[in-house]
Every structure is written in C-alpha cells, then in structure tokens.
Image (tube, helix red, strand yellow):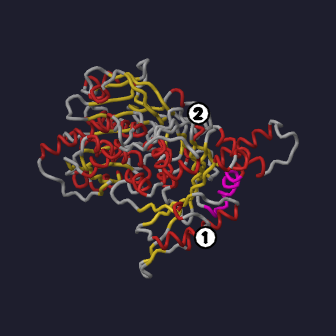
Amino acid sequence: MTKHIFVTGGVVSSLGKGLTSASVGMLLEQRGLRVRMQKLDPYINVDPGTMSPYQHGEVYVLDDGSETDLDLGHYERFTNSPLTRDSNYTTGQIYQSVIDKERAGEFLGKTVQVIPHITNEIKSCVQKLAADDVDVVITEIGGTVGDIESLPFLEAIRQFALDVGKENCLYIHLTLVPYLKAAGELKTKPTQHSVGDLRQIGIQPDILICRTERELPLDEREKIALFCNMSLEAVIEERDKDFSVYEVPFSLVDNKLDELIVRKLGLQAGTLDLDDWRDLIHRLRNPKHEISIAVVGKYAEHKDAYKSIYESIEHGGIFNEAQIRVGRIQSEEIEHEGPERLLAGYDGILVPGGFGERGIEGKVQAIRFARERGIPFLGICLGMQTAVIEFARNVAGLEGAHSTEFDKDTPHPVICLMDKQKNVVQKGGTMRLGKQLAVLEEGSHARECYAADEVWERHRHRYEFNYVYRQQFAAHGMLVSGTSPDGKLVEIVELPDHPWFVAVQFHPEFKSQPTKAHPLFAGFVGAAIDRHAKRGQPSDQQQEIL
C-alpha cells in the first residue's frame, strides 16, 4: 500500500517547506523508493497563473501545461517524480470542484459544508497520487499552522490517517527555532506553540524538523521533545545553509531523517546512494572558473520571481565547474543610466521572461549591448521577443518595430498575438502552455547544445515571432534555428556570427536539474567562461553569489 507523508510548517512563513519536502523526496528516491510529490495551497486563486511575481514569485509550468506553485520547481530539481496538474491544488480549485458538483446535483439536496464535502475533496486529491507503482506520496501543505485558510487542509489530512490507517501516514512539521542575539540563546517556545496548535487540531507530529541558524544543543532538543510529546530522535536539526540549497539533504542525512522515515513507515528501502550529489557539491565547492552573469529583468529585486532562472544558471556553473556571480539588474535602471554603466564587466547577459511594458526599452538596450560587444547572450520568452525587436530596429532597418502587446499601432509588428489567442477572453490558463515539440536547424548553436534534431520544451506565452518577417530577418543575419514541426511558429533565433547569441520562446529553466544542467544553460555558461578567459581580468562589478 502507498504510504503518505504530510509536511506542514509553523511559526513563520518562508521556512522552506518546499525545499525540505523535495529533499525528503530525493533521499527516499536515492534509497530506491518510488516517490510522488504534491503541494496543497490555501489561497483562493484557482492557480498562480494570474498572480503578480511580487505576490507569489515565479509561475512554474509543467509538461501538461499546468501553471503551478514555485515549490514544484524544487520537486523537479531534486527528484524524478513525474508532476502533473494533480500535483498542485489550491483552495480555489477545491471549492470550484465542490460547487460544480453541487450545481450538477451530485449531493442529492444535502447541505454542502466544509466538513465533510470540502475535506473529502481534499482527501480525494491526495488519494489520486496513490498507485501500485508508488511507494510514498509526499504532500506539502502551504501556509502556516494557525492560519485560518489552512484549517480545511489540516482537518483533511487529520481525517486521512483515519481512512487509510495511521501506520500508513507520517506527519512532518517544519518549525523555526529562533536565536535571540540580546539573550544569547535559542528559543524553543515558538516551536512548542506551533506544535500545540497542530495538536489542538488533532495532529501529533511524528517528526519535527527545526530550522535554525545555529547548532541546536542536546538540552534544547530534549526540551522540545518533552514539551512536544515526541521522542528525542524525532527532533531533527536543519541548520541554515549559506553556501548552497543543494546541501540541505546532507544535513537531514546527518540527522538520520531518512532512516527514521523508513523505519516509522515500515518501508522496504535500499541503501542510500548520494554519489551524484556528493560530486555536485564537490564541483560547487571546488570551481575551476569564476565568472559573472547579468540577469536583466523587471522583477530583479525579487529573487523568487526568477527562481528557476537563477537555479539553472547555477546548474550551468556546476556542469562547467564554475562559480557564477549573478548581478540582478533592473531593466528600468538601464533606461535611466544606460547599459555601459550597469553591464560593463559581465561575462554573459540573460534576459528572462515577463509580461507588461515596464522596463522593455531597458531590455532592448541590454540586448543591443550584448550583441554589439560580443557578450554571450541568452533570451528567454519575452527575452527572445525583445531580442527580435532590437534586431529589427537596429540591424534590419525596421524603424519603430515593436510587439503589438506594447504598441498596437507599430508600423512593424515583428512580435504579434498568436492566431489561437485572438479570441481568448479569460486570462487564467489560456496561454500557449506546456510541452511543445521544436525542430532544430542543422549546424546551429541550439543543435550543437542539444545534440539532437528535435526537443520538447515548456511554453507560457501569447505572443510570437511574426512569421511575415522571417525572410527579412534572415537576409540581415538572424537565423531561425528552431521551429514548430509545421514550421509556422518560431521557437529559437540566434546570430551565427556572434560568439553566442541564442534566444528561445520557451522556458528551458523549467527542465534543468543540478545533476543534469539544461543544455542551453550549460552552453551559455560555457560561452561566458570562454569570454572571461579571453578578457583575462575578473570583474569588479558589485555582484551577488547565488
């Protein structure tokens, strides 16, 4: 029978439940177990697709086109668990499903209530991932214990153990043990209160993972165990990692978390094999190169808005044995101060995706700077579209060229709304989404990176390269190196005469892993290393280590 692990969080938000859940999943997979991952989010939005990056961070897109929580990015980077739209549910989706059933008469005139109808719906979402070929389902509950909006989810997972048997369920609670500098000591009281809130709901944690910036002494662990009604071995220290998030699993292993889970759930597991991950950490700690890359975006000050971008750059660094210093550059600042001041000294420039007109001209200027200076460039989604706009204006001689997203009256709509999007009214879940096939041009940078003639990549966009201009762009030196199988949609453009200038309509960052860097990020970082070697001098730019 499939076993279930439920991960909750307490004291404060942003503790890293997603990272911890992903780490647990990775450890169980490395012991030969078949794992599925799931996130239940308490917000009422149907999905994060229409939410601001400032509110929610990046929208992570799956192969099936689901727009999901960014924590699913952690799941895919750490595990091989196949993710689908059943891997992420929100309160909005839960209530919408129940209301649809009520409208269809499925409840036979009964009063529809949170208990049992909402909680039953939540339990059914969890049960969907259980199967004969799944050993463990890990379900992360979003939000913080004590929040009103989380209560239906917590009640549902309490009931779930009664339905399938407590021996088949494990509750892990992630909490904060803060250090008070004035007192010079760690404080366990917030953790006690958080566990107390859970116990009032009817959930006794089986394992307590204590997030802390300092070592958790034995006497403090004993105090937590006593007041939280659990064994000492079940109080696990998770020390903050300043170097890399990919060290988190090793901290959990040091505290024998994987052994404890296997024993408590009665799992038939193999020996833990972390050789690939140890090699990964070795590469991170012993780089042969040090380079700098500028990420020019409109949400640069908010790290989670480009979470997968930054992680993928790091993966490219791991592949190339390079430490990468990333400069997060607001595209609007380039409009005011110019690219020379903000971008000089970087070994590579990346322009990520996004929506809206703000900062567009700054992106265009950054791309022109990369093109004219021979700086390796990678454009993603809107980054590709702005690369096309820049080339149209400054190389192809198409004065006033723009995207119809930003200028409906442009004389040269080199980027335009896709035909299938013209009659779309609703915003949520209506873009070109998910896995699409691209055919690659022989002899191109893209073909060389992928070492394949066709690839599947994930998309999230409404606007596309205007095919009418394809021959005109080719005549001025821009190669369309990737298209849809029918040749009608442009997926990749590049400049053959440039050291490395590639721009893609899709989102390669969603398919990169620390142990298997995406080919485009590996190639981009490799090109940046080559440029740095030719320049011969390290950058004195103010940068931030990933």
When the figure is inspected, residue 101 is found, relative to residue 465, above or below; the finding is: below
Q: Which of disc 2 and disc 1 is earlier in sequence?
A: 1
Residue at mark 1:
193
Magenta-drawn segment: 145-158
Q: Would residue 509 be counted in the magenta stretch?
A: no
Residue situated furthest top in the rendering: 486
Q: Position of residue 150 (x, y in %)?
A: 65, 57
Would residue 400 be seen by someone viewing this image from the given angle? no
Residue 370, given in percent of the width and then of the height, sits at 24, 42
* Marks 1 and 2, how far apart at CA: 49 Å
For label 1, the SS is: helix
Q: Secondary structure at mark 2?
A: loop
Who's the residue at 74% across and 43% down the image?
98
Residue 479 at x, y = what percent?
A: 29, 25
Q: Which residue is mark 2?
A: 424
In the rendered image, the vertical position of residue 55 relative to residue 97, given as above or below: below
Badge 1: few (under 14), some or many (20 or more) residues near its Cα, within 10 Å? some
Identified at 26% across, 29% down, the residue is 445
Q: Horizontal placement of 167 versus 112: left or right?
A: left
